[in-house]
Image (cartoon, grey):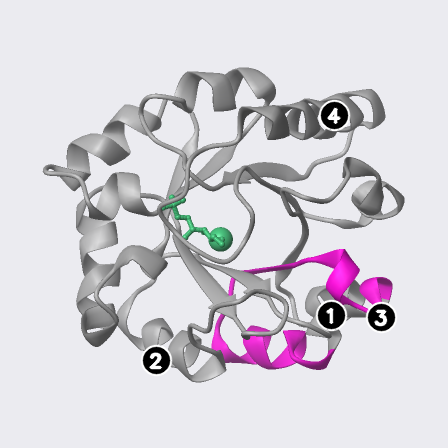
């Protein structure tokens, strides 16, 4: 069954503890935390202190998606703050392997992200070393954008490499995911989907979550 990770980017930033409580109550599987630095992406959200605080309010897995430059400088601190998963964009890093190793050395699951404007090839050298492959179906930076169908080709490439080589990584899709396109995500090989607007802006968020746990 596909695991659903609501993104708290779509929540009220003044009520984050309540938001993670809701995510759990709605029956979701993972909390997706979008960290943006205003440099790698033209938007700024929150950093390690938010992860550390949220950790006190939930036992749900925290999936921390770093949209920051030089992630190798900070991955350790995000692990120490209580992340269960840390993913970053390889083209933003000068030491991809070092960052992956540091995350693993902290006992945290590591992953790489393919942004919508990046080719699948950027993650190929690291596929044997990651726990999660995150394929973006929007350009990273903002919630509420529309799902880019052409990015599914990269999900299929990730799934093919996983099957052919016996890799164990999760395949996560992030950006514009909703009950309307969940079948396509599953067919392409996704095991986890991020959903911001389609859950937080839904009339009945619990039903939206359930509709994607297919
Ligand atoms: C975009 C973020 C996504 C975003 C998803 O840069 O990485 O996680 O919050 O939001 P929706 O589901 O609204 O596209
Ligand atoms: Zn994200």
Compared across the picture, whether 201 is left or right of 100 comes to: left
Compared across the picture, whether 106 is left or right of 191 comes to: right
Residue 84, image x and y in percent?
A: 52, 61
Q: Which residue is mark 4?
A: 157
**Crowding near the residue tagged with mark 3, few <14, some 14–19, many ≥20 C-alpha atoms within 10 Å:** some
Residue 165, image x and y in percent?
A: 84, 27
**Crowding near the residue tagged with mark 2, few <14, some 14–19, many ≥20 C-alpha atoms within 10 Å:** some
- Secondary structure type for disc 2: helix
Label 2, label 4: how many angstroms apart (C-alpha)?
37 Å
Q: Which residue is mark 2?
A: 53
Say if mark 4 contacts mark 1, CB within 8 Å: no
Between discs 4 and 1, the one toward the N terminus: 1
Q: Is residue 33 above or below residue 138?
A: below
Q: Which residue is mark 1?
A: 105
Label 4, label 3: how many angstroms apart (C-alpha)?
25 Å
Asked if residue 77 lies in the magenta stretch, the reply is yes
Residue at point 42%, 25% (across, down): 1
Label 2, label 1: how many angstroms apart (C-alpha)?
23 Å
Residue 31, by quadrant, is: bottom left
Between discs 2 and 3, the one toward the N terminus: 2
Asked if residue 178 lies in the magenta stretch, the reply is no
Q: Which label lies toward us, 3 or 1?
A: 3
- Secondary structure type for disc 1: helix
Between discs 3 and 1, the one toward the N terminus: 3
User: Which range of residues does the magenta coloring cover?
Assistant: 73-97
Label 2, label 3: how many angstroms apart (C-alpha)?
29 Å
Residue at point 46%, 73% (across, down): 44
Q: Which residue is mark 3?
A: 94
Residue 191, image x and y in percent?
A: 52, 31
Residue 54, by quadrant, is: bottom left
């Amino acid at each position: 069954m596909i695991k659903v990770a609501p993104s708290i980017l779509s929540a009220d930033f003044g009520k984050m503890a309540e938001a993670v409580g809701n995510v759990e109550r709605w029956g979701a599987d993972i909390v997706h935390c979008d960290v943006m630095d205003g440099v790698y992406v033209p938007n700024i959200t929150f950093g390690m202190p938010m992860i550390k605080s949220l950790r006190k309010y939930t036992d749900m897995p925290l999936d921390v998606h770093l949209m920051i430059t030089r992630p190798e400088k900070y991955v350790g601190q995000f692990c120490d703050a209580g992340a269960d998963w840390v993913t970053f964009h390889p083209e933003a890093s000068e030491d991809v392997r070092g960052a992956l190793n540091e995350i693993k050395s902290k006992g945290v699951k590591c992953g790489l992200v393919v942004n919508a404007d990046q080719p699948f090839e950027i993650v190929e050298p690291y596929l044997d070393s990651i726990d999660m492959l995150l394929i973006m179906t929007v350009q990273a930076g903002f919630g509420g954008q529309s799902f880019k169908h052409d990015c599914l080709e990269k999900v299929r490439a990730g799934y093919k490499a996983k099957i052919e080589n016996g890799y164990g990584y999760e395949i996560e899709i992030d950006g514009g995911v909703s009950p309307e396109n969940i079948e396509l995500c599953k067919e392409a090989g996704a095991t986890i989907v991020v959903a911001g607007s389609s859950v937080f802006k839904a009339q009945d968020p619990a039903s939206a979550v359930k509709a994607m746990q297919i």
